[in-house]
Amino acid sequence: MGARVHTVAFQGIDTLAIEVQVSITGGLPAFTVVGLPDKAVGESRERVRSALAAIGLSLPPNRITVNLAPADVQKEGSHFDLPIALGLLLGMGILDPGDLDGYLVLGELGLDGSIAAVAGVLPAALAAQASDRGLVCPAAQGGEAAWAASGDVLAPAGLLELVNHLKGTQILGRPRAEIASDTTTIADLSEVKGQETARRALEIAAAGAHNLLLVGPPGSGKSMLAQRLPGLLPPLTPAEALEVSMIHSVAGKLENGRLLRRRPFRDPHHTASAAAIAGGGLRARPGEISLAHNGVLFLDELPEFQRAALEALRQPLETGTIAVSRANLHVTYPARFQLVAAMNPCRCGHLDDPAQACSRAPRCAEEYQARISGPLFDRIDLHVEVPAVAPFDLARLRPGEATATVAARVAEARALQAERYAGTKITTNREASGALLDRVATPDAKGQALLIEATGRLRLSARGYHRVLRVARTIADLEGAAAITRTHIAEALSYRRRGPGRQSAV
């Protein structure tokens, strides 16, 4: 007898329809899985055998062949367990052929017949909806599937529960769509004393989604500032939440199958490999760049990261995507993230303090900062010095504005940008192209004259020129100004890098 069950394979956040074909024929007992399975798929034979035994069934003493079609596509992951088991039940006549025709199935089987969580349920649910099918998935991820699949969603905890439902002796209710709870406490910006320039740059970065580099000695508050950026950002829109959750679903990082509601804030350690940052591995899983999509990627101790990992940032910062290429696989993930980086001015960190600086200053600063390529520096909109605050000043300085106050201004600036770019795929000033900037970010005569003069003095590239315009447009939006003036251009120029040991401009 032959049986067919529908499932999917994953290519990034995209899916490819896979048909699990099961044939039970005469001959010596054997159980073979073909169709380019990886080791996890090949091992499904033992998991399926044990799961069937756990519900009181045994495989027939025949030749069993499972084909994963199309056969020329690599199949990876344990989510093929459940469709293979159901295909066997169809082939053995325990289930009727029409029971699973309208479903797409995925799930990992335990030896006791339980159905364990797998990566990629959310993209699979979207694929099921697009093909006008229902979805069978693990119980732990029913809430995840219910967001995307408009058809029937079955989320059984075990194989026996699913078989009973299909045979009509038990009824599985539709799972409820769930979203992650927002209980994480965000540190307040008012806790940062002093650092007015850095606080201002943080507000501009939040308003326009600009990339930000904080440079200062150890203990000056660089990490403290960066960790307060999430509180200034607007919440994810429904479309953004779905897109971000799809990436985390493929990576297997959606907690309890609940969609994310807060913008991601990823802060990998500087020992992270290039594959961990850009994505890759045996299954070309998304890396930190993609996991930070529609959110923030914070790289502390920037020069300490591997050179290959840093260079992997260059393309995504321009295109908003990252291509992960392997010998047998080419996957593209979304990667529209906001880069926030922090670094010491030199290895010892005390370049501007003669009493603590090493004997090799300022040459050590040039060598230390040379670990970061010029093109990567050029892609960072805001370069800000964060000087050390004397301990005795901390007691005298008054707390700054609270996160809620600054976030309100950021929200108003974002609303202006949403209105300006309505009808396009652009949502913030950082994404505006050069041609679009000519229409929405043309300075007045004095501002244009200053920008042209500064372009020559600072030797700005064409990219740097446009980034100054984008930052100036955001500064004007924070003030609610329709036109960009000389003042806005001057402030934007003050955040451009001028060279090792002199990060702040004007």
Image: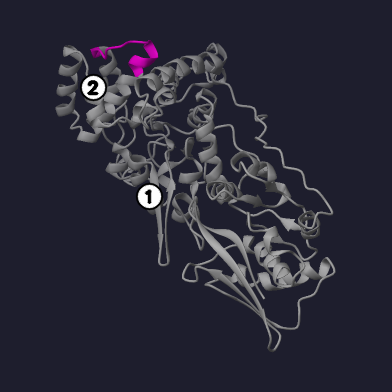
Give the mark nearest the N terminus, 2 or 1.
Answer: 1
Label 2: which residue?
439
Residue sitting at x 75%, y 62% = 110
| Image coordinates for residue 498, horizontal then vertical, percent | 26, 31
Q: Is residue 156 above or below residue 68?
A: above
Side of 93 relative to 365 (left or right): right
Q: Is residue 43 left or right of residue 278?
A: right
Mark linked to residue 158: none
Residue placed at 63% from the left, 54% from the top? 102
Task: Bin the neighbour count of mark 1 within 10 Å (Cα to Cα): few under 14, some 14-19, many 20 and up.
Answer: some
Crowd around label 2: few <14 · some 14–19 · many ≥20 (10 Å): few
According to the image, label 1 marks what residue? 312
Instruction: Label 1: state its secondary structure.
Output: loop
Cα separation, mark 2 vs mark 1, equals 32 Å
Where is residue 221 shown, x and y percent of the image?
Answer: 50, 28
Residue sitting at x 61%, y 47%? 253
Amino acid carrying label 2: it is: Arg
- Magenta residue span: 475-486
Is 264 one of the magenta-colored residues? no
Secondary structure beneath disc 2?
Answer: helix
